[in-house]
Image: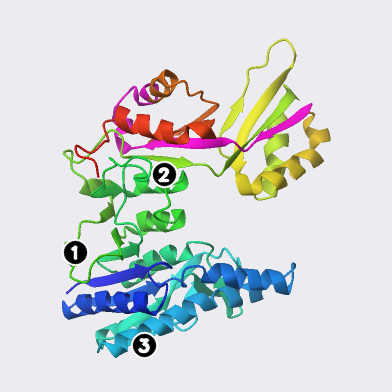
C-alpha cells in the first residue's frame, strides 16, 4: 500500500463532468489499496472572476478580506469532488485549510506554509477515507485565512506530501509530462522520463509553465518525489505508478545512461529591458539603481554594465518582468537625481531563451555552442546570465521560435520520429 497525494489543477476541475472523471481516477487508486489525499484548484477561470469582484468592490481592498474571497474557489471544488467520490462509493470528506490546520505566514496573497498538522488527517486516512483538500489556502496568526499566490495549489500539494510522508505527489495537469521544450514550437520535442529538482527549478524559473517554482523548491528541500501527469487520458489508461509521466527526483536517481548535456530549453516573452545611459562610473552607482527597485519588491534578472572608458560614465542594462515595467520606470524616474543617468530607455520586444542541464557542470563549451548557433542564424544576443546549470540570453522577440528550434537541434534533443 502506498500513500499518495494527487493534485488536480483548474482545467481538470472545470465542470461537473471533469470532476466526475477525476473521481473515477481517484477511485482506481483507492481500489488498488492506496491511501489517498487530494489537493484541488479552483475551476479554470474562477480565481480571476473572484479577483475581479474584489477590484470592483474597492481599488484599495483589505488583503485579509481579499484572501477570504479568492480562497472560495478551492472550497467549492473540494466539496464538489467529495460529493462526486461519495456518489461512486468512495468514502471521502473535504478538509479546509483552517480545519487541519495548514499554518502559514501572514503575507496575505503570498503566504508561505510554516507547518501542517496531520493528526486528524492521518486518522481519517486510516479509516479508509479520501481526504479532499483545497489548495492555495492556509491559516495565519489571528486565525485569518491566507492564500499562497498564483499556482499555490502545487505548493499546497507538495507541502501536504511532505507532511504526510507520502510515497509520491502526482500533479495532474493539461500536459502529460515535462518536455525538452514547448512541443507547440518544436514538434520533435521529447517527453522526459526523469528531471532533477535543480533542473526543474531552473526550467520553472525561466519560463516553463508546468510547475510553480515554489513547489519545486519545496519538493527539493523536503525530498518529495513529484510526478507530472495528464488528467486528460482515457478512463482505461494505466495506473499512475506505471503511467509514463515525468518524475521530478534527486540527482542520485538518474543514472549516467539517462543523463544528458542539456535537459531542456525554455523561453519567456514576459521580459522588459531597461537601459540607463551615461551613469557616472563611481563606487555606489550600481547600488543607487538597484536598491530602490529592491525596496519596491521588483525582481531584476539580467544585468549588463558596459566598460567605462575616458568619459567617466557607463551604460547599465537589465531586465524586469513586463508586469513591473511601469512601476520600474516610475521608481527610476524618482531616483534620477541620486543615480545621475542621462536617459532612460526601455524595450518590451524581447524574449529570454534558456538552456538547462546538470551536464553543464562537467562539460566545457556549452555556452559557446549556444552563442555560435544563434550567431549563425543572425540572432543578436543583447544580454547574458548564467548559473551552474543554466545559460540564458536575451534576444529580439521576433526570433523566439527560431532560436528555440535551432538550439533544440544543436544540442541533439530532437526526437528520432516527429511527434
| Cα–Cα gap, marks 2 and 3 | 39 Å
Is-magenta flag for residue 346? yes
- Residue under numbered circle 2: 202
Q: For marks 1 and 2, give the one nearer the viewer.
A: 1
Is-magenta flag for residue 39? no
Residue occupying the point 16% across, 76% down: 32
Q: Where is residue 183 in the image (x, y as percent from the top left)?
A: 34, 45
Query: Dividing the picture into quarters, in which one does residue 274 lie?
Result: top right
Residue occupying the point 36% across, 54% down: 220
For the residues labelled 1 and 3, say whether their Cβ atoms are less than 8 Å apart: no
Dot 1 lies on which element?
loop
Q: Position of residue 215 (x, y in %)?
A: 42, 58
Crowd band around label 3 with a 10 angstrom C-alpha radius: few (<14), some (14–19), many (20+): some
- Residue under numbered circle 1: 241
Regarding residue 414, the answer to whether it shows in the image is: yes
Q: Where is residue 15 in the image (x, y as percent from the top left)?
A: 41, 76
Label whose residue precedes the other's in the sequence (1 or 3): 3
Tell me: 351 left or right of 413: right
| Cα–Cα gap, marks 1 and 3 | 26 Å
For the residues labelled 2 and 3, say whether their Cβ atoms are less than 8 Å apart: no
Tell me: 111 left or right of 2: right
Give the numbered dot on residue 144.
none
Label whose residue precedes the other's in the sequence (2 or 3): 3
Residue 286 against residue 25 in the figure, above or below: above
Dot 3 lies on which element?
helix
Query: Dividing the picture into quarters, in which one does residue 330 lie?
Result: top right
- Residue under numbered circle 3: 83
Dot 2 lies on which element?
helix
Q: What stretch is highlighted in magenta?
A: 342-369
Amino acid at each position: 500500500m502506498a500513500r499518495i497525494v494527487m493534485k488536480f489543477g483548474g482545467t481538470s476541475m472545470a465542470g461537473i463532468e471533469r470532476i466526475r472523471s477525476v473521481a473515477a481516477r481517484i477511485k482506481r487508486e483507492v481500489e488498488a489499496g492506496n491511501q489517498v489525499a487530494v489537493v484541488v484548484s479552483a475551476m479554470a477561470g474562477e480565481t480571476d472572476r473572484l479577483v475581479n469582484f474584489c477590484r470592483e468592490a474597492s481599488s484599495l481592498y483589505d488583503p485579509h478580506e481579499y484572501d477570504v474571497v479568492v480562497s472560495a474557489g478551492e472550497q467549492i471544488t473540494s466539496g464538489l469532488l467529495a460529493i462526486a467520490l461519495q456518489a461512486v462509493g468512495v468514502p471521502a470528506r473535504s478538509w479546509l485549510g483552517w480545519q487541519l490546520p495548514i499554518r502559514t505566514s501572514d503575507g496575505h496573497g503570498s503566504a508561505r506554509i510554516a507547518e501542517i498538522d496531520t493528526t486528524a488527517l492521518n486518522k481519517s486516512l486510516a479509516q479508509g477515507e479520501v481526504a479532499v483538500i483545497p489548495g492555495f489556502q492556509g491559516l495565519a496568526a489571528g486565525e485569518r485565512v491566507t492564500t499562497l499566490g498564483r499556482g499555490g495549489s502545487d505548493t499546497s500539494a507538495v507541502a501536504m506530501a511532505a507532511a504526510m510522508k507520502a510515497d509520491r505527489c502526482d500533479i495532474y495537469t493539461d500536459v502529460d509530462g515535462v518536455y525538452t521544450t514547448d512541443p507547440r514550437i518544436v514538434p520533435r520535442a521529447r517527453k522526459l522520463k526523469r528531471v532533477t529538482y535543480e533542473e526543474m527549478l531552473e526550467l520553472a524559473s525561466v519560463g516553463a509553465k508546468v510547475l510553480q517554482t515554489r513547489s519545486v523548491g519545496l519538493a527539493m528541500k523536503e525530498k518529495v518525489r513529484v510526478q507530472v501527469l495528464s488528467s486528460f487520458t482515457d478512463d482505461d489508461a494505466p495506473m499512475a505508478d506505471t503511467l509514463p509521466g515525468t518524475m521530478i527526483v534527486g540527482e542520485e536517481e538518474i543514472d549516467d545512461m539517462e543523463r544528458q548535456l542539456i535537459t531542456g530549453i525554455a523561453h519567456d516573452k514576459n521580459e522588459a529591458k531597461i537601459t540607463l545611459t551615461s551613469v557616472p562610473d563611481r563606487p555606489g552607482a550600481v547600488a543607487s539603481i538597484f536598491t530602490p527597485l529592491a525596496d519596491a519588491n521588483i525582481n531584476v534578472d539580467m544585468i549588463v554594465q558596459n566598460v567605462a572608458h575616458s568619459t567617466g560614465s557607463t551604460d547599465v542594462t537589465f531586465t524586469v518582468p513586463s508586469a513591473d515595467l511601469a512601476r520600474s520606470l516610475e521608481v527610476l524616474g524618482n531616483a534620477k537625481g541620486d543615480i545621475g543617468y542621462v536617459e532612460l530607455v526601455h524595450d518590451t520586444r524581447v524574449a529570454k531563451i534558456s538552456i538547462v542541464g546538470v551536464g553543464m557542470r562537467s562539460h566545457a563549451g556549452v555556452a559557446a555552442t549556444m552563442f555560435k548557433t544563434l550567431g549563425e542564424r543572425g540572432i543578436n544576443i543583447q544580454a547574458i546570465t548564467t548559473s551552474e546549470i543554466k545559460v540564458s540570453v536575451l534576444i529580439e522577440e521576433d526570433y523566439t521560435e527560431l532560436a528555440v528550434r535551432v538550439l533544440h537541434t544543436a544540442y541533439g534533443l530532437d526526437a528520432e520520429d516527429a511527434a
